Amino acid sequence: MVRWPAARSESPEEVEREESGGKRQAEEEEGRWGRMLPELLGEIVRRVDAGGEQWPQRKDIVAYAGVCRRWRDTARGIVRQLRENGDITFPSSLKEPGPRDSPVQCLIRRNKSNSTYCLYLGLTESFTDKGKFLLAARQFKHGAHTEYIISLDADDLSQGSNAYMGKLRSNILGTKFKIYDSQPPYNGAKVSSSRTSRRFTSKQISPQVPAGNFVIGRVSYKFNLLKRGPRRMHCTLQCPSAKDTTGEGDSPKSKAHNPGTTILKNKAPRWHEHLQCWCLNFHGRVTVASVKNFQLAATEDASQPSGIGDQETVLLQFGKVGDDTFTMDFRQPLSAFQAFAICLTSFGTKFACE
Amino acid sequence: MGKTIKLISGDGEMFEVEEAVAFQSNIIKSLADEDNADDCIPLPRVDSQILSKVLEFCRKHANSPSVHTKFAAIPSELCPKHDGSAAGASSSESSSAHSETCRACYDAVMKLVQWDLEFVKVDLDLIHHLLKAANYLDIEDLMFMAVEGAANAIRGNNPEEIRKLFDLENDFTPEEEKEILKEYSWLDDPFEP
């Protein structure tokens, strides 16, 4: 008895075409890659991703996602997996939590002449290598308040721009800051409209044109005015909670989660009697003493199932390595955007004594 | 020839090949394992031109040590089978004997990988057919290489170039296009601040 090899999830049209003697006609040949099975497209994009784990090769995934709807949908599946690694691939990755196990190492470069700060993903160990550009911020004075506009485009730092990501606003004294996100706090469900999930997905990859400003965090500073010592930082952030990072499905329903609260405090430096200075162990990532330098650990951590932070693990570290060069290392539950905004507050405090 | 298997392509051509060659396909293997030793196995979804290319690949792989071609873009420096480390090497003598085997194994694998890379340096049309055939017939190494062939055509190109190569239409809405343009301009570095 003759047996036919088992069908392997092909569409009825494809089966019919192949079984009609396998003749290739002109119409069949057109758009064949467009009709490629999703699993096979998935294999291809996974291979492109595997070959391009670092920038600049990572461009290839972004190029892949710009080809056509079907390919973009496939890339979205990979992006969801990538999110769990904290990889930065698309602009939207900047608002996703960083990795769980080890921090992402970034650099911030300041340009005093135009009050601009640029965030780069570090690609090597060196503090002078360029890195991959991530975000730019510029300081603006609004009456007595100071604002920092954060954008994907270093040449376009306006709130109305397509590249606008959010902003930081300080109080008059420079002791309290609010972080605004151009998107509502981590609610993929709200971003969607009544359109089908397929169209919804292409919006998932890039942030939308802003509909407003949403407060997603607050940072405050308390200073030791009597004795010169390190200042105390307190941050409250809306971050995705633990169950959000378990990519359980693509349905909008699985994304209708509530953001959790994360509370961060700076780790207290130790007084080094011998060196007569305050010391924090930055593990080589900070090389110039500065009152701006800090390490933040969580008392409440939205990414932990219990919601409790261990108060030990450094979730955000910031410090000076050159006149206008700073390192920024962050991990979950913080996103690159949130980490950058918090670091900007360090520049914004008026009582910085250096 | 040892034991052979008869295969019939979608357009009716018969291919008789050694078991070791045909059994690169897990599907053919599982079908042939059943009682009907004299029957031909029909493969309606693969025509003769593609089947002959597939069998060329299988022939090459049947006579070579098993290759774990699970590398990202370039094979790693270490032998895939032995990890570069001698399993259970206790004395220097056994480890040197092992490293000889290891070296030989490594060289054979590298040669095969080179052959594979050449094999998929073909037009995307053929890659497409090989990919479908490898998927249909469940031939792991061929699947791997066909995917690599497609991925290689994507690397280093921008979306428009990729569309041309793969004959795909740009079916994005103007709004989606704006998003994509934003993503793409984010790839370029701004001037130093």
Image (spheres, rainbow, N blue to C red):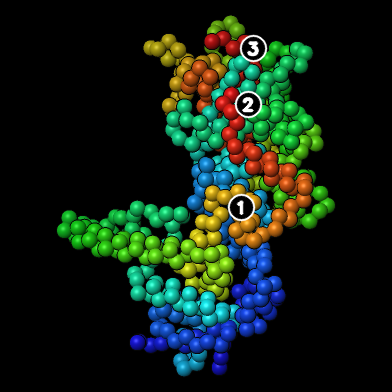
Q: Position of residue B136 (x, y in %)?
A: 56, 74
Circle 3 chain: A
- The residue identified by callout 3 is A350
Q: Residue at x 54, y 64 (%)?
A: B123
- Circle 3 sits in a helix, a strand or a loop, which is it? loop
- Circle 1 sits in a helix, a strand or a loop, which is it? helix
Q: Residue at x 43, y 75 (%)?
A: B56
Looking at the picture, does residue A223 appear above or below residue B59?
Answer: above
Q: CA distance from mark 2 to mark 3?
A: 15 Å
Looking at the picture, which amino acid does disc 2 mark?
Ile
Judging depth in this view, the residue of A26 and B93 nearest the camera is A26
Looking at the picture, which amino acid does disc 1 mark?
Glu
- The residue identified by callout 2 is A342
Q: CA distance from mark 2 to mark 1?
A: 40 Å
Asked if labels 2 and 3 share a chain, the reply is yes
As drawn, the label of residue B161 is 1
Q: Position of residue B139 (x, y in %)?
A: 49, 72
Q: Nearer the viewer, mark 2 or mark 1?
A: 1
